Image (cartoon, rainbow, N blue to C red):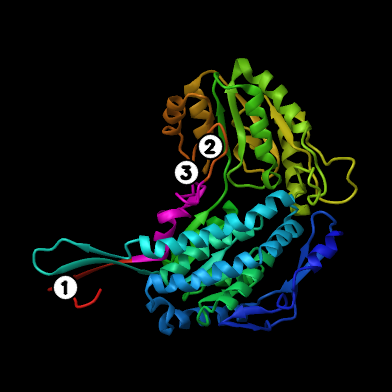
């Protein structure tokens, strides 16, 4: 089956509309956003492009739904009933979600097929929180009744990135909805199809009008959304540069904001750990999403005496990775999502070589593929942590191997980064892994593998962002705590 025929298997009847106030409506312009397949380099979908007028209409619908609609006034358990119907609708579209992700980003189908169930887990966790989270806390009082009440923050702009559009969007709107907020989904223009399917599922689940909305917008309209005074909170996942701008805008008007930004995460390989095992793990990890993963372990720190041997194993592991058509079950590395991103990666390769790093393998487009934005898994050896390739996020399948003299220096190098999203300690010694993990200034640390948990919390230190997503920590940003102190206990809480 060709790439085009897979794209055509998804019902696109709503793609040239926007979902606003519980209805599919025509946008104010006839402009369309092209979705380009990174496999064929051809347009596979077209969706509506919202203008500033559409943003205003969407915010108004979400604002009215919050201020006078039933959703914020329902109990969390009542809201959970609609969320259960929503989760059921989402599961019924699992095949469409998988196709959309591969068509838009080139992610291999083995990962795309697993993604819907994993992603819908964010909604499942929000349903559980409806009954497990203390939305009303009673506090001791000698005379009267004191309560801390967690109320919805208001209208939420949920802005998702292009690399993992389904999982990221559901991680935002699940907790926002159970909290009682109304939401405006704004997917990345490169990968909007998952958000369209989510909106169709929300429509079928029966949310009150204006509770879930969808616009697809380019820069100007997106900026207007972030600036809008009736948007109470912005939840953004994406680049550092855009995150800095959003933080500035939200700071000016004291809007609530959650930011999940970039990473340059370090894997520290201790002397007790098997290097061949480490190499297979690290090479496999940079193949995930073709290295377009903010939490990817892209800096590998190893003892100077073991550096060359680890590089040798990394070269072997990377050169064994099969590259090509993401629908082929034998393929482990699909294309880079966009031509502009591919060119950005190539620029970093040139920078690494010019600054003195040793290109051990990869560093170019594979010669056997005539079409598509493919790039070989790449290993740089003898990297100094001050080099550009060690300090800036490349967002591609590129590893930088950095030698160190001892454990203290390894920790210092790992922390010498503007980012602090993830990390790992490769060792069989649990105590050593814990000891080092406590010293790393990063939001998540795994042992002998990349790790992340949206059931606990996900987010970063430093320029990797503000706040957390997932778990109880991911629900709290959608709530405003209100202290209520009464002379006596009310008849009903």
**Residue 443 marker:** 3
Q: Is residue 361 above or below residue 166?
A: above
Residue at coordinates 63% horizontally, 47% vertically from top-left?
Answer: 293
Give residue 31's quadrant in the image: bottom right
Residue at the spot 50% in from the left edge and 81% down from the top edge: 208
Q: Disc 2 versus disc 3: distance between alpha carbons? A: 8 Å
Q: Label 2 vs label 1: CA separation?
A: 48 Å
Residue at image mark 2: 423
Report helix, strand or loop for mark 1. loop
| Circle 1 crowding by C-alpha within 10 Å: few under 14, some 14–19, many from 20 | some
The residue carrying mark 1 is 489
Residue 161 image offset from top left, x and y in percent: 62, 58
Quarter of the view holding residue 86: bottom right
Q: Check contact, mark 1 vs mark 3: CB within 8 A.
A: no
From the top left corner, tell me how far across and down residue 186 is, in percent. 60, 68
Q: Is residue 198 left or right of residue 460?
A: right
> Disc 1 and disc 3: Cα gap in Å?
41 Å
Magenta span of residues? 453-480
Is 334 left or right of 151, judged from the image as shown? right
């Amino acid at each position: 089956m060709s790439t085009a025929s897979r794209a055509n298997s998804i019902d696109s009847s709503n793609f040239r509309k926007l979902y606003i106030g519980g209805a599919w409506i025509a946008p104010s312009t006839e402009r369309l956003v092209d979705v380009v397949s990174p496999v064929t380099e051809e347009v596979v979908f077209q969706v509506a492009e919202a203008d500033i007028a559409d943003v205003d209409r969407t915010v108004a619908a979400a604002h009215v739904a919050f201020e006078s609609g039933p959703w914020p006034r329902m109990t969390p358990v009542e809201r959970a009933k609609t969320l259960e119907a929503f989760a059921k609708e989402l599961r019924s579209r699992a095949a469409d979600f998988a196709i959309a992700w591969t068509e838009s980003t080139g992610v291999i189908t083995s990962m795309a097929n697993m993604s819907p169930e994993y992603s819908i887990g964010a909604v499942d966790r929000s349903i559980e929180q409806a009954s497990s989270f203390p939305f009303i806390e009673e506090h001791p009082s000698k005379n009267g009744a004191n309560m801390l009440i967690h109320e919805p923050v208001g209208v939420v702009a949920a802005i998702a990135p292009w690399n993992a559009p389904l999982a990221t969007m559901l991680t935002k709107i699940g907790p926002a909805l159970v909290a009682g907020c109304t939401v405006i989904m704004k997917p990345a223009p490169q990968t909007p199809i998952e958000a369209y399917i989510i909106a169709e599922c929300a429509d079928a689940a029966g949310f009150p009008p204006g509770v879930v909305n969808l616009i697809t917008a380019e820069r100007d309209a997106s900026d207007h959304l972030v600036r809008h005074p009736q948007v109470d909170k912005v939840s953004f996942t994406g680049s550092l540069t855009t995150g800095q701008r959003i933080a500035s805008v939200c700071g000016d008007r004291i809007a609530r904001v959650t930011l999940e930004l970039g990473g340059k995460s370090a894997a520290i390989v201790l002397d007790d750990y098997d290097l061949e095992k480490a190499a297979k793990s690290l090479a496999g990890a940079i193949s995930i999403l073709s290295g377009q993963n903010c939490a990817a372990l892209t800096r590998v720190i190893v003892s100077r005496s073991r550096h060359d041997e680890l590089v040798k194993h990394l070269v072997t592991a990377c050169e064994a990775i099969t590259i090509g058509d993401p629908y082929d079950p034998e393929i482990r590395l699909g294309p880079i999502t966009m031509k502009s991103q591919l060119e950005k990666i190539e620029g970093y390769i040139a920078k690494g070589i010019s600054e003195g790093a040793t290109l051990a393998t990869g560093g170019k487009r594979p010669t056997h593929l005539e079409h598509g934005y493919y790039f070989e898994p790449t290993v740089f050896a003898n990297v100094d942590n001050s080099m550009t390739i060690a300090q800036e996020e490349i967002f591609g399948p590129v590893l930088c191997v950095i030698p160190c003299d001892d454990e203290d220096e390894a920790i210092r190098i790992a922390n010498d980064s503007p980012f602090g999203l993830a990390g790992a300690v490769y060792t069989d010694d649990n105590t050593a892994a814990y000891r080092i993990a406590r010293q790393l200034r990063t939001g998540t640390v795994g042992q002998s593998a990349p790790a992340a948990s949206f059931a606990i919390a996900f987010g970063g230190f430093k320029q990797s962002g503000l706040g957390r997503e997932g778990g109880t920590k991911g629900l709290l940003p959608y709530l405003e705590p209100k202290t209520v102190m009464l002379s006596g206990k009310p008849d009903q809480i």
